[in-house]
Amino acid sequence: MRKSSYLFVVFFVFIGVLLLTGCRPGNAISQNQSATSTTSPQNPTHTIAPSATSTHLPTLTATATEVPMTPTPTLTQTLTLTPTPVRVYNEPGQITAPILLYHHVYGEVSTSRYQVSLPDFESQMAALKDMGYTAIPISLFLQALLEGAELPEKPIVITFDDGHQSVYENAFPVMQSYDFPGVFYIVANRINGSPDFVTAEQLKEMINAGWEVGSHGYSHLDMTLNHSLVAKEIGQSKTDLEYALSTKVLTFAYPYGTIDPFTAQKVSDYGYRAGMGLGKAKTHTFNSLFYLNRIEIYGEFTLDQFREVLANQ
């Protein structure tokens, strides 16, 4: 009986301790689940629902902040389109294209037949553009005449004789502004430092810009007066210019425009493809190949006279 009383007391004390500490298995599980639910990541664009085992957590609702949009400025750009010149196939055997001849281009006022003032030259180039002309190199002119080639509707060739410095300084930049190439006929013995004449380096600059160079003789002599001059004036001038400028010299301009059958034949014999003379015709054929007509532009021409020269057939 004493032993049974002792066991009863021990059991009663054990039950009391449990009640005082609250160590119930369910409490531990509930606390672990609650801790898990409070560490859920928050997504600002969603509403987070409360955990089934954590009824005491508040519902979190993300509120989007509206940011005012700044209008993107509209860029307005004006494009100027330059029409591509219409090109027409030219059958071999004939070509219609004026060939102009200048000498000096300088000064505000012309004082001689061979000097076109700079303002007049600028006006003449602008007039050519307005009239629909497109300048072409002599190589393309010859290709069209001899073999056939595509050309602009109104081709023109612009040439300069002698090799004066004023052509490089004045005519060259004006023509560049219109995208006009030219043909420069050079006296071969003048490119090695002669005063007032272009140098080899200046000619190379012009060639790189699309210009072409022809021969105007070795020392600008009239060969019809002395046929013994042809080897040097026609032959050596071509060789020297091609060597100094690293370019092909295709055409020869007769000094003073003078010609006879002998000199014309020698121009062909020395490897030129054409000879340049004087005249008014704008249509050229095989028969005129070694004396192509060039229209000289006189210094005293008014702009109306210049236009009239080009308008005349």
Image (spheres, rainbow, N blue to C red):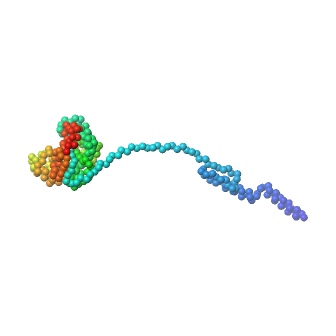
Q: Residue at x 16, y 47 (%)?
A: 277
Q: Residue at x 42, y 43 (%)?
A: 76
Q: Quadrant of residue 30?
A: bottom right
Residue 211 appears in the rendering: no
Q: How many marks?
A: 0
Q: Residue at x 80, y 56 (%)?
A: 19
Q: Quadrant of the C terminus?
A: top left
Q: Quadrant of the N terminus?
A: bottom right
Residue 98 appears in the rendering: yes
Quick check: 282 left or right of 179? Answer: left
Front-most of 101 and 224?
101
Quick check: 112 left or right of 87? Answer: left
Quick check: 84 left or right of 247? Answer: right
- The location of residue 6, given as percent across then percent down, is 87, 62
- The location of residue 248, given as percent across then percent down, is 22, 52
- The location of residue 9, given as percent across then percent down, is 85, 60
- The location of residue 91, given as percent across then percent down, is 22, 54
Front-most of 219 and 151?
151
Quick check: 149 left or right of 4? Answer: left
Front-most of 132 and 8?
132
Q: Residue at x 28, y 45 (%)?
A: 179
